[in-house]
Amino acid sequence: MAALRATLLGAALRSRAERSPELRERDAGRLADPTWFQHPGQIGYVCYADRFAGTLTGVADHLDYLVELGVTYLHLMPLLAPRPGPNDGGYAVADYGAVDPRLGTIDDLANLAGALHRSGMSLCIDVVVNHTAREHPWAQRALAGDPAARAFYHVFDDRALPDRYEQTLREVFPAFAPGNFTFVPEMGAWVWTTFNDYQWDLNYGNPAVLVAMAEAILNLCNIGVDVLRLDAVPFLWKRLDTDCENQPEAHWIVELLRSLVAMAAPAVAFKAEAIVPPEQLVQYLGGHEVPRHECDIAYHNQLMVMLWSSLASRDGRLITHALSRMRHRPPATTWMTYVRCHDDIGWAVSDEDAAAVGWDGWSHRNFLTEFYAGEFPGSFAHGARFQDNPAIGDSRISGTAASLCGLDPAGDPAGVETAIRRLVLLYAVAFCYDGIPLVYMGDELGLRNDLHYLDDPDRAADNRWMHRPAMPWEVAERRHRPGTIEARLFGWMQRLGTVQRRLAALDAAAPPEPLAVDDPHLFAFTRSRPGEERFLAVANFSEEAASCSTAALPFDPGEATLLLGGDESPAVGGGRLTLPGLGFAWYGFTPGSAAGTGP
Ligand code: GLC
């Protein structure tokens, strides 16, 4: 134990000593403003470097586009050297110390980080902590029979233990990678593979794994990244008779890595990718009985799922209930509020939440799948099922946000209009709910499903590629042509960011409070800090106009400032606030000022 402590401490101190003068300066800045990621005006963008601009240098050449959009935080999808062949979109890393040669070099990455910093943006990259590719040297040594390397993974000589574990494990990719163990003939043994058969889960019960991953992380910090996205973090620790997710040790590991990074590279923050129920999710932000310093940022999966649920059901009651009962995140942390990402959407709607609004959880989840797969009568969505698991009646959804909203430029103009409103509505909530709104590449242009992945044998089996299109720069040019879909959506994203940036009420110290309103189609919430401007957002998920009594709102919108409304303005009269179909409104009100104040 003492040796482990000394090794980890040594790694952190070595890394600190090697930090460049520029990064030390960045450390000093972040230490003076440790919750920089909480400020209103942080706007995120996420893309694959190659699909956005070919290479890392290509990304650096397109920073003007991001600046134009108002982006301050760029998440580049996995960019470290992956295995050849299928690699789960880069989530099968063969070398944590090298960039994928197709994208560039470590120097290119460092240069890009510098260029982003000079443009006022921070850089987030992925660290795949749960598993390596079977092509990683650790796995290769294990395959060659090295017992120390074999101990880096969970390896079983027979099926006895795997079979016992399987009894309580879920399957992440039941369709193309069933089960959680893969027989490896070279070793005559079974290896734990939660995801694909070429992604080998690391054994964090082995201190050498912790040291090796800590060193990999510390090296990445010194390239100049600002945020590390810890991939699949709930899976880090295995325990018999459990689902092997969210185990206490997984949190200790994150906490330990976090403190090493705090010593070596204080400018660097951690972001958790933990797609788990809300009660477990806040724990990755350190929200335990006694708060702890774990991740600084986490994806707000619950908000994302509830937004899509509300859009399909035209009903705001479930989102109101589910978000009201969620525990607040610890004060020094924040959410990543998103509408779409590179993954599928899994219907994280609990039976309890559904029952609270009088629905059956299973039926609602099933409805959402059918709806977004375009199977439900009258559905507007053009998505597809992902990982159908008939054994447990579960299925998830693929598709771009625009396609899930029913955008079809070749269709009738009214339909296009409605689809744009849907997409803007979802982002209008994501931009003000709580945290860093994240624009998923292409949503700002309304990019639709891209079926080219079917021509690539390494990708054809995984329909998540349908919502990972390449950036069509000629289409992006249309953002400057007024009236086009691209100009409308891009303009909306810019406006949402511009207004959000000016609103003190959207400070992280003012968490959202969902409001019970008297129209089921609406979702409303407020944010405020004592004595300061109060904020109110109302969203109408129905295509028809809907209204609610202003008595349930924290202030009368008639006496407040409309900060932002959809394409058609809301109306206040007779004690009711009326929103047009798929409309939204952001209001600001300063207590004591009769007319309210604008931003
Ligand atoms: C995360 C990624 C997902 C990947 C998985 C395995 O959930 O977001 O794309 O398939 O981890 O690395």
Image (cartoon, rainbow, N blue to C red):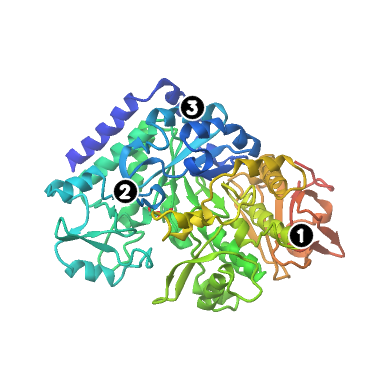
**Residue nearest the viewer, comparing 531 with 399:** 399
Q: Are marks 3 and 2 in contact (CB under 8 Å)?
A: no
Q: Looking at the rendering, which quadrant does residue 306 occupy?
A: bottom right
In the image, what residue occupies the spot 25% across and 41% down?
211
Mark 1, secondary structure of its residue: helix
In the image, is the residue at mark 3 within 8 Å of ligand 1 by its beta carbon? no
Q: Are marks 2 and 1 in contact (CB under 8 Å)?
A: no
In the image, is the residue at mark 2 within 8 Å of ligand 1 by its beta carbon? no
Find residue 253 and name its label.
2
Find residue 166 and name its label.
none
List the residue tagged with mark 3: 114
Q: Is residue 103 left or right of residue 97?
A: right
Q: Position of residue 267 (x, y in %)?
A: 45, 33
Q: Position of residue 244 (x, y in %)?
A: 31, 62
Q: CA distance from mark 2 to mark 1?
A: 53 Å
Tell me which label, 2 or 1, sits earlier in the chain. Answer: 2
Q: Are marks 3 and 1 in contact (CB under 8 Å)?
A: no
Find residue 413 and name its label.
1
Q: Is residue 494 above or below residue 523?
A: above
Tell me which label, 3 or 2, sits earlier in the chain. Answer: 3
